[in-house]
Image: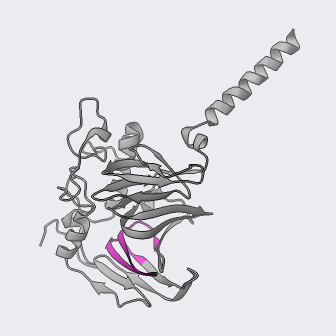
Amino acid sequence: MHVLTRALHIALVALAATLAAWTPAAAEGGRPAGIVTALVGTATVSRASLGAPRALKFRDHVMLQDRIATGDESLARILLGGKAVITVRERSVVTITELPHVSTVDVESGKIALAVAKERMRPGESIELRTPNAVAGIRGTVVIAEVTRQGGAASTRFTLLTGVIEVLRLDAARRPIGAASVLNPLQTISVDRGLSPVRPITRTEGKAASAEFGLPPKTRARRGADWIAKDQVARALASVDPDRGRGADPRPDVKPDQGAKADRDDRPDRVKLPVGSPSLPLVPSYALQPSGKKNKGKDR
């Protein structure tokens, strides 16, 4: 009897461990890369374990190797590993992959913004933003990438709003080639058959680029720009895990990613967001400052 009881106890412990590990992500196969924190319009996900692309929904898990495609007049925001936020504009295609210490956001076509909170990354960890013909190393920045195609050729444009990045051109085999170009805040570069000269943009141009990715949460004016990426990650965390979000950023004005007034049951997926003319941009105008200039909190 004692032996039977012990065997039953061992079986129950093993079953409990199995159930604890059986998350929705594990059930679908693959390793989780992130979670959808905001979705306006339509988006689909293609995955090896799925027979056909399926509709992406709010709070869906995104797995490594997933191919995300957004529809017309759509916007999807995804929290990646609690350290970065990717905002995908309409008619865009993105895949998220991972190697040891390096996560990669691969933009096949369209337009995305990537905000990375440097404080949340472990030593030696990095995020790459790749396109068919270019790559940028990202740490603690807010950057916009746009890929346009004409026939089989692709052209890339990076626009940096905060932080510093290095951009390299890729050859036909997608290997880095040539010397890197460095971008500072409010600068842009195009990559076609080569790297264009780095060009400064005005704050007005920066505001216009930022506004395309906005949701309408309220933020208070603060000095400097280092907090921008950290703030976006905290907001995304708050939308899927309010307790964790408050722990990451205890400010009372942090709201879930829906931004607009929520329903009584506080379900962000019910909120309808205006994608075409959002009331708040990706980066507030007072935080858009060229490198070396002090932020006085005023829009010029």
In the figure, is residue 194 to the left or right of 125?
A: left
x, y (%) of residue 38? 34, 48
Kindly indicate the quadrant of the structure image that contains residue 177: bottom right
x, y (%) of residue 294? 22, 73
Tell me which residue sits at (37%, 47%) in the image. Answer: 37
Tell me which residue sits at (56%, 49%) in the image. Answer: 50
Kindly indicate the quadrant of the structure image that contains residue 191: bottom left
x, y (%) of residue 78? 41, 53
In the figure, is residue 64 to the left or right of 19?
A: left
Tell me which residue sits at (17%, 55%) in the image. Answer: 279
Specify whether residue 151 is painted magenta.
yes
Quick one: 253 or 137, which is closer to the camera?
A: 137
Number of on-image labels: 0
Q: Is residue 78 above or below residue 103?
A: above
Specify whether residue 191 is painted magenta.
no
Quick one: 149 or 269, which is closer to the camera?
A: 149
Tell me which residue sits at (20%, 59%) in the image. Answer: 276
Whether residue 80 is visible to the viewer of this picture, yes or no, is no
Q: Main secondary structure of the magenta part?
A: strand
Work out which quarter of the rendered image holds the C terminus and state it.
bottom left
Whether residue 143 is visible to the viewer of this picture, yes or no, is yes
Q: Residue furthest top?
A: 1
Kindly indicate the quadrant of the structure image that contains residue 228: bottom left
Work out which quarter of the rendered image holds the N terminus and state it.
top right
> What span is in magenta?
137-165
